[in-house]
Image: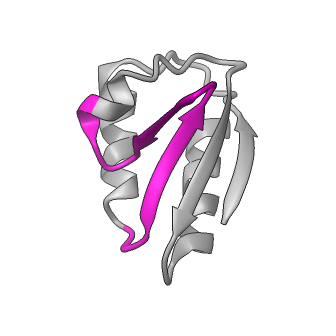
Amino acid sequence: MKKNVTIQMKESLEATPIAHLVQLANQYQSRIYLEMDSKKVNAKSIMGMMSLALTKGSVVTIDAQGEDEEKAVTAIENFLTK
């Protein structure tokens, strides 16, 4: 399951919000990746997520594969757009 999302968070995605996003992704059994431009990283990897340099207004693709993929995509979308 893939879904494009425009980041709407008020705070920039630096270390603490990225850590929370990684913790959220790790609650799901599905494989979860975030794609931006030509880069695709594991959403469960803090180092990979830090390398994306996500900012408000960026468009990312959430790509989840597994038994709880819909719940994972919805949760990550909600996190990025609150």
Decide if residue 76 is on the left or right side of residue 59.
left
Percent coordinates x, y for residue 19 in the rendering: 30, 36
In this orientation, does residue 82 appear? no
Image quarter of the N terminus:
bottom right
User: In the orientation shown, which residue stands out farthest toward the front?
Assistant: 38
Looking at the picture, does residue 39 appear above or below residue 12? below
Looking at the picture, does residue 82 appear above or below residue 56? below
Decide if residue 67 is on the left or right side of residue 14.
right
Percent coordinates x, y for residue 61 in the rendering: 65, 43
Q: Which of 29 and 80 is in front in this view?
A: 29
Q: In which quarter of the image is residue 37?
A: top right
Decide if residue 38 is on the left or right side of residue 48.
right
Q: Residue at x 52, y 42 (%)?
A: 34
Q: Which residue is drawn at 34% across and 45% down?
A: 22
Q: Write the start and end of the magenta stretch as one range.
A: 28-47
Q: Residue at x 39, y 69 (%)?
A: 28
Percent coordinates x, y for residue 26 in the rendering: 31, 59
User: Would residue 41 be counted in the magenta stretch?
Assistant: yes
